[in-house]
Image (tube, coloured by chain):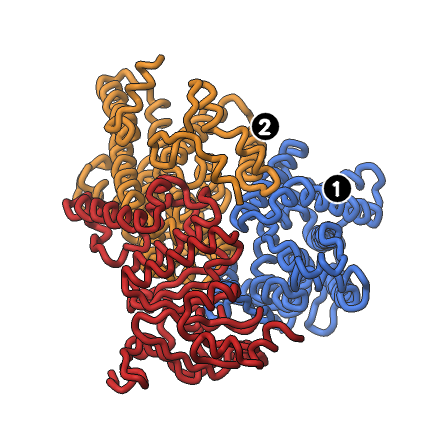
């Protein structure tokens, strides 16, 4: 581990850092030379028009795709090319743009899946119903319920995830991601398809998660209001490359950004 | 009526109902058999039902819970039947014991199951790389390979085209052992599914990408499910070899795999009890109809199974029928029957109806 | 010379597989489903030929009747069994297709019995001898039909309007619909063409060996599917290539005495190896799931 990579330019601890991240699909450079630097406790926004490569960046960070070139560091540790499950265990959790809940499991079971790696009980212990199993199941239930309470989902705990209202499904995805005990949380358009009330509730939730858990969050968003309301720093992607980055207010007033977003 | 319903709602009875039913069956039929009150044909029927239940429960692990389609389950059974049968006959002659030696049975069950499990592990490897329907074809291909290789190996090894001669266990007792094995298989499956590992396995079926993103070791679970499922298919195979004097590899063709699949689908994929009931019912009908439907009319039952299979799958999956499904399903119909204004949530607790809210986008 | 004989046999066998495989691969590409019952269409075509022969006695009329009947059957199966499941999970569709396959086989057995029917009127015997190479007439006919069908299919897909619409639907069904393509009609046409080719393939099988049972199409169906997967499912040239490759492998394996009994195992073994090494098949495109 290289200590210089662990500390950002202004001396704060760096949680995520990418260097010249690039992925090529055939002739298309979906993501090209993206350099992110996210500091501990920060709420960072990744914005850009449709097809700018935002979700592809998430897929690279979480190991769904392997980068063509470039490096990804999580708390100074090189995680480039690692498998998704491994990356999750190392501390990155995410939500999905098109909600991906476990629809045949109940709400509380969804969160329990997220807790899988934090509570130990091996297959034999479960099959033979050894004491460890019973103890771990109790722990699973209690910790999951606790998380559901934080997200005010506890009254729905026995619903099948598929039967939750849309806004609550998005919330459950965040709760499930938090259950994996991440150091960095990636939220992929969490407000997509939500009405203004739900969006407001979500913004409160995100702020709460950040404060309460001291979470570092990287957020993909379309909704400018949400971004300007809660993100400190932004990176704007356009055609896979960085169009602008820096403090939110500055970036949003950048003529190039305005043009990419509004003008054709 | 209400008191009976209340009895079946006791948590203990609910949780262990399936064990109790099978255990009671083993006990009652066992006693009848020992005292000589159970006819040979019923002993045979119970053997066949136990084998089918073992196959259906083990396949439901792969198809119902892991969400991968296996069309080669009969292939794993075939491995078990041939290896278990061969080892049993070798042991019988080496140890100079009778065909109904209990120790030999146990050893061959373990070895037959273990070798089938090994094959399951090997077939599980492509499952890590291949998408659903491709994997289905690989399992089908595996089943055909096993069958054709076993049949065409020199006849000194596995009997060649004439089939493998295997020891037979006294019919009077074999089904009791088979029912006990069903209990064991049920316990393993149910305990596995109702644990963090079961949740992980179902999460893979529901959404593999999300499961990986939650840190679930998909590789480990896929391989494990394939292995344990093939183990019990192998055990069923060994049992089968003990019910026959000769094992023919032609028995284990892909139609047999399909029949097991039908049981799992009819049982409502993802329901262990459903698979068991469907397996018992289909086997019962198969055996009973065999004497009723003669000659080419015997396939009449296949026509019916095929139609039921198609209709059930369409009913349960057609996107256009979702409103119809909500109106007419097992739960609402039974609820109507008992005139209850509650719906049953997934783990059996009753919760008040709040589905109106759930339906808003 | 044995090798050359085996090679020629393999080419004609491969041609038959290719005809069936094209049906599999087109349906997979366009309806995104594995039509497990495709092989049984061959068998139904065989019985259609059998009935027509009883009535008319003309092999050519019988072939045409089989094609017509198979087309109707294929379209009906799609309409009633698969169409309701459009958008459902691939597993559900596959299980339904398995049900249809089983249904067709058992209905045929009820209607015609399990005893094989001999279609002697269709059988073509006789061989051409060139030195030590013997080529049966049925081989020549099969090869000719294969070439005609391959050329026709290639032209159809490239130049005809429905053919190009098929390519569009297989690339992106939603986009194709937005461009005004009637996807339901295209899917029906796909099933129609696939079923017609299956009927022709059945004819090629019966001119060689005129024994007709209700499982006539089962094994060739699975083999042709294997061929489609080897070639890269969804790709028509892939199905042709895969069919020929598999046919040649089968014929060569059958001509080697020690290996002959294990021919099925060899073919399926090759399938497994190809899928492991190149999961998308020889000419297939790897698709990634959108996350």
Camera-nearest residue between B214 and A75: A75
Camera-nearest residue between A138 and C54: A138
Q: Do the dots labelled 1 and 2 sit on one chain?
A: no
Distance CA(mark 1)–CA(mark 2) = 21 Å
Quarter of the rendering containing residue C176: bottom right
Q: Judge whether residue A182 can be spotted in this image.
A: yes
Q: Colour of chain A?
A: red
Q: Is residue B130 left or right of residue C147?
A: left
Q: Which mark is residue C110?
A: none
Identified at 29% across, 43% down, the residue is B194
Quarter of the rendering containing residue B44: top left
Camera-nearest residue between A114 and B172: A114
Q: Colour of chain B?
A: orange
Q: Which mark is residue C48?
A: 1
Q: Colour of chain C?
A: blue
Q: Label 2, on which residue?
A: B297
Parent chain of label 2: B
Q: Quick one: quadrant of the N terminus of chain C?
A: bottom right
Q: Where residue C72 sits in the image (x, y, percent)?
A: 76, 43
């Amino acid at each position: 581990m290289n200590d210089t990579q662990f500390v950002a330019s202004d001396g704060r601890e760096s949680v995520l850092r990418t260097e010249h991240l690039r992925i090529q699909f055939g002739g298309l450079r979906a993501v090209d030379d993206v350099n992110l630097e996210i500091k501990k406790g920060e709420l960072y926004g990744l914005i850009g028009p449709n097809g700018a490569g935002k979700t592809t960046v998430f897929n690279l960070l979480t190991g769904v795709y392997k980068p063509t070139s470039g490096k990804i560091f999580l708390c100074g540790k090189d995680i480039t090319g690692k498998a998704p499950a491994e990356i999750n265990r190392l501390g990155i959790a995410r939500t999905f743009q098109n909600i991906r809940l476990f629809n045949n499991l109940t709400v509380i079971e969804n969160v329990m899946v997220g807790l899988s790696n934090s509570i130990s009980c091996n297959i034999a212990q479960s099959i033979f119903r050894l004491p460890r199993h019973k103890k771990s199941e109790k722990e699973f239930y209690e910790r999951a319920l606790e998380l559901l309470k934080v997200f005010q989902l506890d009254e729905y705990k026995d619903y099948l995830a598929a039967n939750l209202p849309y806004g609550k499904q998005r919330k459950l995805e965040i709760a499930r991601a938090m259950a994996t005990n991440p150091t960095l949380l990636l939220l992929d358009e969490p407000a997509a398809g939500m009405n203004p009330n739900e969006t407001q509730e979500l913004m409160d939730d995100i702020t709460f998660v950040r404060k309460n858990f001291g979470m570092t969050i990287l957020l993909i968003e379309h909704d400018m209001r949400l971004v300007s309301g809660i993100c400190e720093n932004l990176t704007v992607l356009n055609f896979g490359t960085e169009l602008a980055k820096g403090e939110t207010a500055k970036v949003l007033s950048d003529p190039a950004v305005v043009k990419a977003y509004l003008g054709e | 009526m209400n008191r009976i319903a209340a009895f079946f709602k006791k948590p203990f009875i609910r949780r262990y109902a399936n064990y109790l039913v099978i255990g009671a069956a083993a006990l009652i039929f066992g006693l009848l058999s020992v005292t000589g009150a159970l006819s040979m044909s019923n002993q045979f029927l119970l053997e066949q039902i136990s084998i089918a239940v073992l196959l259906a429960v083990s396949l439901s692990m792969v198809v119902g819970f892991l969400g991968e389609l296996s069309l080669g389950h009969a292939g794993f059974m075939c491995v078990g039947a041939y290896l278990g049968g061969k080892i049993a006959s070798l042991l019988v002659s080496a140890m100079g014991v009778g065909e109904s030696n209990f120790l030999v049975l146990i050893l061959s069950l373990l070895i037959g199951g273990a070798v089938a499990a090994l094959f399951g592990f090997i077939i599980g490897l492509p499952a890590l790389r291949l998408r659903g329907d491709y994997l289905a074809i690989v399992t089908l291909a595996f089943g055909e390979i096993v069958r054709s290789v076993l049949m065409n190996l020199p006849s000194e090894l596995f009997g060649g085209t004439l089939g493998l001669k295997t020891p037979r266990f006294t019919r009077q007792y074999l089904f009791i052992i088979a029912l006990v094995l069903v209990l064991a298989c049920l316990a393993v499956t149910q305990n596995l599914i109702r644990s963090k590992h079961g949740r992980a396995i179902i999460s893979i079926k529901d959404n593999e990408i999300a499961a990986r993103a939650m840190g679930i070791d998909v590789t480990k679970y896929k391989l494990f499910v394939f292995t344990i499922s093939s183990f019990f298919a192998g055990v069923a195979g060994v049992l089968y070899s003990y019910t026959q004097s000769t094992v023919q590899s032609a028995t284990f063709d892909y139609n047999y795999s399909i029949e097991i699949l039908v049981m799992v689908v009819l049982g409502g994929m993802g329901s262990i009890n459903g698979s068991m009931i469907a397996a018992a019912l289909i086997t019962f009908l198969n055996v009973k109809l065999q004497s009723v439907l003669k000659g080419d009319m015997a396939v009449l039952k296949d026509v019916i199974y095929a139609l039921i299979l198609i209709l059930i799958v369409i009913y349960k999956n057609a996107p256009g029928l979702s409103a119809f499904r909500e109106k007419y399903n097992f739960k609402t119909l039974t609820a109507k029957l008992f005139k209850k204004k509650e719906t049953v949530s997934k783990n059996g607790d009753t919760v008040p109806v709040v589905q109106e809210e759930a339906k808003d986008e | 010379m044995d090798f050359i004989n085996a090679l020629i046999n393999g080419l004609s066998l491969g041609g038959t597989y290719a005809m069936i495989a094209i049906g599999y691969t087109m349906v997979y590409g366009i309806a995104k489903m594995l039509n497990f019952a495709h092989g049984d269409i061959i068998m139904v075509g065989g019985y259609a030929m059998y009935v027509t022969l009883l009535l008319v006695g003309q092999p050519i009329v019988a072939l045409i009747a089989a094609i017509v009947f198979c087309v109707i059957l294929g379209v009906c199966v799609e309409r009633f069994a698969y169409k309701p499941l459009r958008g459902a999970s691939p597993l559900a569709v596959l299980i339904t297709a398995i049900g249809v396959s089983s249904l067709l086989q058992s209905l045929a057995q009820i209607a015609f019995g399990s005893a094989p029917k001999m279609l002697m009127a269709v059988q073509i015997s006789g061989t051409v001898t060139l030195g030590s190479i013997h080529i049966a007439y049925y081989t020549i006919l099969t090869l000719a039909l294969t070439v005609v069908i391959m050329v026709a299919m290639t032209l159809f897909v490239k130049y005809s309007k429905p053919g190009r619409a098929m390519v569009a639907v297989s690339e992106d069904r939603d986009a194709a619909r937005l461009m005004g393509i009637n996807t339901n009609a295209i899917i029906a046409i796909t099933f129609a063409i696939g079923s017609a080719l299956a009927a022709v393939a059945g004819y090629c099988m019966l001119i060689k060996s005129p024994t007709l049972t209700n499982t006539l199409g089962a094994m060739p169906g699975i083999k042709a599917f294997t061929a489609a997967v080897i070639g890269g499912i969804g790709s028509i040239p892939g199905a042709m290539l895969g069919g020929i490759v598999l046919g040649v492998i089968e014929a060569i394996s059958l001509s080697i005495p020690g290996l002959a009994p294990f021919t099925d195992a060899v073919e399926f073994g090759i399938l497994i190896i190809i899928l492991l090494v190149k999961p998308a098949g020889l000419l297939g495109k790897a698709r990634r799931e959108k996350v």
